[in-house]
Every structure is written in C-alpha cells, then in structure tokens.
Image (tube, rainbow, N blue to C red):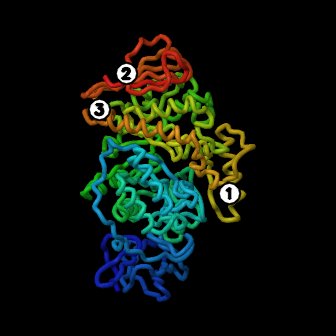
Amino acid sequence: MTAAGDRRPLRWGAHPGAEGNWDFAIWAPAAKRAELVLDGSVHEMAPMGNGGWQVSVAARDGLPYAFRLDGTDYPDPAARRQQGDVHGPSLTADPATFDWGATWQGRPWDEAVILEIHIGTFTPEGTFAAASERLPELAELGITAIEIMPVSQFHGAHGWGYDGVLLRAPHPDYGSPDEMRAFIRTAQGHGIMVILDLVLNHFGPFGNYLHAYAPQTFGGEATPWGDAIDFTRPELRALLRDTATGWIDEYRLDGLRLDAVHAIRDPSEPHFLIELLQTIRAQDRGRPIHLILEDERNLPDLRHAGYDAQWNDDWHNALHVALTRETQGYYAGHAADPFGDLARAMAQGQVEEGQTRADGTKARGAPAAHLPWSAFVNANLTHDQAGNRPEGKRLLRLIGDEAGAVIHALLLLMPFTPMLFMGEEVGSTAPFPFFADPPDDAIAALRAGRTKELQGIGYDTGAMIDPASPDTPRLCYPYGDTGPRAQEWLQLTRQLLSLRRAHLLPLLRSGKTGPGEVTRHGAKAFHARWPFAAGTLDSLVSLGAPASNAPRREPALFSISDPRRDAFAIDMRIE
C-alpha cells in the first residue's frame, strides 16, 4: 500500500510496477473515500493530496477493476481496455507484452500521401484485423500514411468516434489493443506510417463519468459538442497529455492529428498545446513523430512552434463552391469569387489570411505562405465534408468523373501534403453520412438534433439518411465496386503517386524558393507555378472552361485532355 499524503505526480489509471505490483491512481476531489475493486477484491486507496488517490497492489494483465467512490463503482477514465462497454469494469493492460518484431524508423513528413480511413467501415468486417489485409495493396499503390479516424471507446457499437469517453482504450468492436498494434506493425512493415486522429477538446455525452470523479473537470463556455474542459487544472492536463503520449509510445504511432484545437480554450502559460508539443518533442523515439492540427482559425503560430501541418479546409471549400455552385453554410464565404479563392489557395496555401474579403468582411487567419507547402494538408474530400450533408454524398457524386479525375490529379500533383478519403483512390461514390449508436432514450434527440443542424446550414433534410440506424454504417463501405471503372481510377491514382514520388519529392527536398504564382486564363482556368531550388513545378488546369488564351506548351510530364481546348483538363511539367 502507498502512504497517505504522497505528493508524487499523479499518473491516472493502472500501470505495471515493480515485483508484480501495479500502481492505480485517480483524481477524485469530490470523493470522501476511494477504493480499488480489483478482480472482486476491495483495496483502500490512500489520498495523495489535491484530490488524488492511489494504491499499489499485486495484479497481472487482464484483470477487471473499477474505482469505488463513496460506495459507487466507476470505470477508469484512463483505462487502456474495457471488459465490455463504457459503463462497466476496466481491464488491466500491459502494453509491454506485445512483440513489435523489427524496429521501425518512420518516414519523413515530405513523403506523406495520406489516406484517411474509418476502421468500422473501411472493410465489411470493420476490424483492425480485416483492415490489415488491405495494407499491401495500399503500399503498392503509393499510399505512405494512414490517418485513422478516432478509435477511443465510445458508447454503443458504431459511430464516427468523435464522441469518445475512454480516450486511451481502443473501441472493442474494432478489436483488442494488441490487434490494433498488429495493424500498425503490419502497416509499418509495408512502409506505411500510421497517424491517429485524437480528440482532446471534449468528451462524448454517454458514459463520461468525469463529472462524478471531479466536477472541476469542466467549466467555462461550452463547446459545440459538450461541456468545456478546464485546461487550467494540472490534473486534467496530465490526463490528456498522458493520453496523447500513451498512444504514441504504446502503439508505436507515427503521429497524431489533433481534432478541433480551436476548441481547446486555455488561458494558461504555456498553453496546453505548447506543453503537449514540448512533451512529445522532448523524447527521441528513433523515428519522427508528425503532429497535425485541425484548426479553423487559419493561424500559422502553432506550426511556427513545431507542429508539422494543419488541415487546410480553405482548399476544399473553395474547390467545392467552384465546382458545385453550392453556397450554403460554411461555403458562403467563398460565394463571391470561388475561382479567385482557388487561385489564392494554390499560390498562398490558405485563402483567408486576415485580409478584407470581397463582401467587405475581415477574413479570419494570418498570412502563412512563408511556411513549407508540406505544412498544408489539402483534401478534396474528408469525413466531415461528406458527413455534413443529409445523404452523405461525396464530391465525386456531385460533379462526375470528368471533373473528378482532374481535381484528383491536381491534388496529388501540387506541392501540398495530399490526403485522400478512403475510396477516393478507386473513385468511390459510396456515401459517408454521420452515424452514431446512442442509448435508446437519446435516439429521438439525435435525429432531431441532426435535422436541426443540417437545416441550419441550408440543407433539405427530407432525404436524410437516419444517423441512428444500424444499417447506416453498412452504406459507407467504399470498395463495393471492383469493375472496370474502379480499376481505371486505381490505375490513375497509381500513376499520379508514382509521378509524385519520382518528380515532386526531389523538388520538395530541394527547398521552396518563394510563393506560388498563379495566372488566371478566363474565369475557370489557371496557370500555376511553384518555384524550388531544383526547378519549377508548372501546371495548367481548366475546371469548367478551357484556358483558350494560354500560350501553347511543350508536351507535358502528365496530362488529362488539353487545358487549352477542354473544359476539364490538366497538364503538369517541371522546368
């Protein structure tokens, strides 16, 4: 047993210790008494001060346990594994028992070609084991990184994962912790980096017992997804910091994508995101750790501090408006001049950089064109952009293959870090609507809330796919078509990634020598040039009307149709 008043730093959860003992600790300042219930035996926990409790007892891997606070049992908020759902006992889990086999030295960020996947719908089985079987073909295609949508355990069987409540435990419907590790080991064995999408800005609404442990967990203005976390609390910072480093170290990840960091409101010095960055960068793991942000503020500051890259929704949104003419919701900001915004995105990276916009409003953000192009993760489609539609339609479904092939080539042959959403590599038109599995008494509220949200951004929800139906996830499998069309798309992707590896990568590594230069040719065609020390990447692209006044060009390194003659076309060369 540990002594009362021990003031060692709190490590939430269950950790293997010395000589067969395990250390169990929790922050529960609201409790008058705390006990560990381990495999049916009850052990008194000693107060650490500041609301912490701990005990060291003999244990082994795979034992059920819970924390009993004033007579009520709760799962461990820092559990690495659950015995069942989010409401029941946790399980002791020793990450050191997994055999990683060969060492892995990682890959540099400039090689990243990302495929975003959702484990539950990436295969018909929806498991880590089934996903592992797909990895050799992705490696052969030229995919060098997989970004997994969140897997932190959430309530129910299926969901997107952004409502996790046990942040360190893989969702059991996808497989065990060791099955997730085996997936990562297989990916890395094929040269593919694995990046995990991690939500640290909020907890899901069902099965979150932190209110019982510590009402002090939450405070301030609520986020769009629930109560705001009080990031000034050192104990909570420790939980979230150890969650992030635990995923990296215990699963040999190549990096993290941090969800919606603009919702991490922290007046502390240093800001939690800086503290987390410094903690991760302080350790040499023998491989690069890539840290990617989702941050709607369009600021370069965190990339200056040391984060590698940021999702660049400006590219997607301007492209979407230009090709679909949809201007509802967050697309409205690009209604005035979507093709002009596309030109700016190609030249500068971002569109909104604090300037005065065409409608007279001041744009968010600040200039970022001085950053390396790899600091912008560009995508033509993400889970969000399909899922924020009543029927979950992909962009390709809206614009067709002719335009789709051209923007696919443009994405993969620009100097920015490209990201595909699962199925894009084969031209999938399968939907990806939002879905969740709430408690029965919350289903009606989920449907009503989703309807209100989509109507609020201008959609007709008459044909909305039911977000609570267990059949909805099955609609999202993107690889049902294996016919000639899918094979043609696959061959196009393979060709583009081969060109990127052979010709763009040497340019990127030679060093950027200035911003991009984009010349407009009519309303819907562009001549873009990106200068590097080893040469200039040069593209002529038409996205709805030909560049009829563009000068005649020498034969290209790659082309689809003729941008000087055809409405949808691209050619690319290096000078």
Question: Looking at the image, which is closer to me, 180 or 571?
Answer: 571
Q: Alpha carbon of mark 3 to alpha carbon of mark 2: how far? A: 16 Å
Residue furthest to the right in view is: 462
| Residue 51 appears in the figure | no
Residue type (three-letter) at the residue carrying disc 3? Leu
Can residue 511 be seen from the camera position used here? Answer: yes
Residue at image location 30% in from the left, 53% down from the top: 106
Please give the label number shown on residue 33. Answer: none
- Secondary structure beneath dot 2 equals strand
Q: Quadrant of the N terminus?
A: bottom left
**Residue reaching furthest front?**
484
Query: Alpha carbon of mark 1 to alpha carbon of mark 3: how far?
Result: 46 Å
Rendered residue at 28%/25% (across/down): 535
Name the disc covering residue 507, or none: 3
Sequence-earlier tag: 3 or 2: 3
Image point (47%, 50%), residue name: 259
Which sits in the foreground, 506 or 521? 506
Q: Give the number of the disc on residue 517.
A: 2
Give whichever of 217, 332 is nearer the camera.
Answer: 332
Residue 395: quarter of image: top right
Assess disc 1: are there few (<14), some (14-19) or many (≥20) residues with their C-alpha within 10 Å of its C-alpha. Answer: few
Looking at the rendered structure, the kind of residue marked 2 is Glu
| Total numbered circles | 3
**Residue, disc 1:** 471
In this rendering, would 379 be left or right of 285?
right
**Nearer-N-terminus badge (1/3):** 1
Frontmost of labels 2 and 1 is 1
Q: Quadrant of the C terminus?
A: top left
Q: Is residue 460 above or below residue 466?
A: above
Q: Residues within 10 Å of mark 3 (few under 14, many from 20)?
A: many
> How far from the left and from the top, in percent, is residue 240?
41, 61
